[in-house]
């Protein structure tokens, strides 16, 4: 039976190699195109238009300019009790 | 835990993005609530075992009449319930909730995932009862019985993984957000490292290599991966803005994937394995600077100018502290991998502090934050009390800070005492006692925090909080309820 050192190093290298192959596959499939859109996929329209009490007046104005009148958040909107 | 009553959305379908989130949440509701409920039970069990084990280190004559009450068994059950019971099941719940949302579809094979979670729980019960009865595989993080307990985890985890993979394959979103990479990779990495760690032909010294390959990767490629995936979801989601640099987030994920698997051997510095393996591992550990800095800088800059949000969002408070702890534990880990540091810290309480920064201050904090966000969206009730959340936060923060500081300080003192040939070995034990007592006090504070959290959770899921008359969050204008759609989701 082969030694554990070989098993560990080969598995480690294999996992890195498979990750590299997956990266190449993802690249070819276009998974890294339009990263700006990708970064925004978690946000809904409403996420942009919520009034956030911690934001500065400038940040709020910027949000209003881009997304229109801000909506009030729901109770416990940010995770947790109101 | 109330999982039987399916919420009935009302309203009109006029916002496609809202519809997507609602369909996703409806489909994952049962499995996620089961995973969270189980995780919380294991959190309580693990906490009790951890407390008793901690007290026994400075009260060595306490509870020694029965074999199952000895330190070796209690501490092992604490570790296994916390890693595989609390952290892993909480992560399963987060994964099952987050993936359908991110890929814009319903969770597929929700029943399979639910069965998998039950099997995982059965494996944990068998494994931990076995440990208490004296059946221990003798491998760190793999103590539960290889043939009687582990197969339940393999099959159960596999079922959850299949449900997630099928969901991913059926995705309706063109883009794969970075959290999808992190979470899905974790479900592919875990079976590989679990198989290598449990490989039965490696015994004695040889099993040290495979054992630490597993244990270190379980932290880095399982616990870390899902927790970072959650952090990359919740921080931008609460702030209502994308991460500072999406490119950096991808760099962090892919460099973790390329280099992390070779890291584990740095736990065996000075041990009886080939020196080249350890050196390779130290080099790989140094390379971790890339993903760690990429993540730390990215999340920090995302928060800049918006730290005030921590006052308003318990989710953000827990997750951001968790992310900071990720940076801290990773940098500490890289430092500890260096031979010059390792010769002082190895075999000392420093290591225990280090592992708790990782599993508690990082992973557990992220899981608490995630639950505060997810649960109200699934049970349709608010968390009843802002005060209880504050108590929970401050108790667990105080507890873990005291824990880590005390054990880190006495760990260094212990290491220096062990290295000094003029100092009797007994002295190296005596210097740890103040830290061990402080650790028990910290454990009690953490227990109080957990009790507050569990009580609060119970109040919410049992309906002691007012149900929502109007649907909030993303369900503000939800889809029209359709019985056929419900059938399709099952």
Image (cartoon, coloured by chain):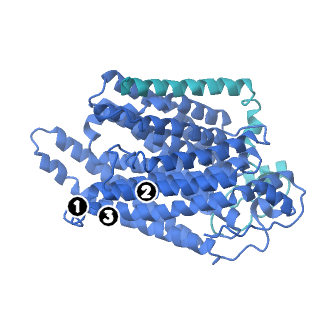
Chain colours: A cyan, B blue
- The residue tagged 3 is B52
Task: Name the residue: 54% across, 61% down.
Answer: B38
Q: Earlier in the sequence, mark 3 or mark 2?
A: 3
Quadrant of the rendering where the N terminus of chain B is positioned = bottom right
The local secondary structure at tag 1 comes to: helix
Please provide percent x and percent y for residue B137: 34, 45
Closer to us: B479 or B239: B479
How far apart are the alpha carbons under marks 1 and 3?
11 Å
- The residue tagged 2 is B126
| Residue B152 in the image: above or below residue B45 | above
Going by the image, does B146 lie left or right of B35?
A: left
- The residue tagged 1 is B58
Going by the image, does A30 lie left or right of B427?
A: right
Closer to us: B430 or A27: A27
Going by the image, does B312 lie left or right of B106?
A: left
- Judge whether residue B437 can be spotted in this image: no
Task: Name the residue: 58% across, 41% down.
Answer: B187
Viewer-nearest of labels 3 and 2?
2
Do the residues indicated by labels 2 and 1 lie within the same chain of the protein?
yes
| Residue B362 in the image: above or below residue B460 | above
């Amino acid at each position: 039976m082969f030694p554990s050192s070989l098993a560990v190093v080969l598995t480690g290298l294999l996992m890195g190699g498979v990750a590299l192959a997956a990266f190449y596959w993802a690249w070819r499939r276009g998974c890294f195109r339009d990263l700006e859109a990708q970064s925004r996929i978690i946000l809904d329209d409403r996420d942009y238009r919520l009034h956030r009490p911690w934001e500065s007046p400038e940040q709020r104005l910027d949000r209003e300019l881009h997304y229109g009148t801000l909506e009030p958040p729901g109770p416990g909107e940010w995770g947790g009790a109101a | 835990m109330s999982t039987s009553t399916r919420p009935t959305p009302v309203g009109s379908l006029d916002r496609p993005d809202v519809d997507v989130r609602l369909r996703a949440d409806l489909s994952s509701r049962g499995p996620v609530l089961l995973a969270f409920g189980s995780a919380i039970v294991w959190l309580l069990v693990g906490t009790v075992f951890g407390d008793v084990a901690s007290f026994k280190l400075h009260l060595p004559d306490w509870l020694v009449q029965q074999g199952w009450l000895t330190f070796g068994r209690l501490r092992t059950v604490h570790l296994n319930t916390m890693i595989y019971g609390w952290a892993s099941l909480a992560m399963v719940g987060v994964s099952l909730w987050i993936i359908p949302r991110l890929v814009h579809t319903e969770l597929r094979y929700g029943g399979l995932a639910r069965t998998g979670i039950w099997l995982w729980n059965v494996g944990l019960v068998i494994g931990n009862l076995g440990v208490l009865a004296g059946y221990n595989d003798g491998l760190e993080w793999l103590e539960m019985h290889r043939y009687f307990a582990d197969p339940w985890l393999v099959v159960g985890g596999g079922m959850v993984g299949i449900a997630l993979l099928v969901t991913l394959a059926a995705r309706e979103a063109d883009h794969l957000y970075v959290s999808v990479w992190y979470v899905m990779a974790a479900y592919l990495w875990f079976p590989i490292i679990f198989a290598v760690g449990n490989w039965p032909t490696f015994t004695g010294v040889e099993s040290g290599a495979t054992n630490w390959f597993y244990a270190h990767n379980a932290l880095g490629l399982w616990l870390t991966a899902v927790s970072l995936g959650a952090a990359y979801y919740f921080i931008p989601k609460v702030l209502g803005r994308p991460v500072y640099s999406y490119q950096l987030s991808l760099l962090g994920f892919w460099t973790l994937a390329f280099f992390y698997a070779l890291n584990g051997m740095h736990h065996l510095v000075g041990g009886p394995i080939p020196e080249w393996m350890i050196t390779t591992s130290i080099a790989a550990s140094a390379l971790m600077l890339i993903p760690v800095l990429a993540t730390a800088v990215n999340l920090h800059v995302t928060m800049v100018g918006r730290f005030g949000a921590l006052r308003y969002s318990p989710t953000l408070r827990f997750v951001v502290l968790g992310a900071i702890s990720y940076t801290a534990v990773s940098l500490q880990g890289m430092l500890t991998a260096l031979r010059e540091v390792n010769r002082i810290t190895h075999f000392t309480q420093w290591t225990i502090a280090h592992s708790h920064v990782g599993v508690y201050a990082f992973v557990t904090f992220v899981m608490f934050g995630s639950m505060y966000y997810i649960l109200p969206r699934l049970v349709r009730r608010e968390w009843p009390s802002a005060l209880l959340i504050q108590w929970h936060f401050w108790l667990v923060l105080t507890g873990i800070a005291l824990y880590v500081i005390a054990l880190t300080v006495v760990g260094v003192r212990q290491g220096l005492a062990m290295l000094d040939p003029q100092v009797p070995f007994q002295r190296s034990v005596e210097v740890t006692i103040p830290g061990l007592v402080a650790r028990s006090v910290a454990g009690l504070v953490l227990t109080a925090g957990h009790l507050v959290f569990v009580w609060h959770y119970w109040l919410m899921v049992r309906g002691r909080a007012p149900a929502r008359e109007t649907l909030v969050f993303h369900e503000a204008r939800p889809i029209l309820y359709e019985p056929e759609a419900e059938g399709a989701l099952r």
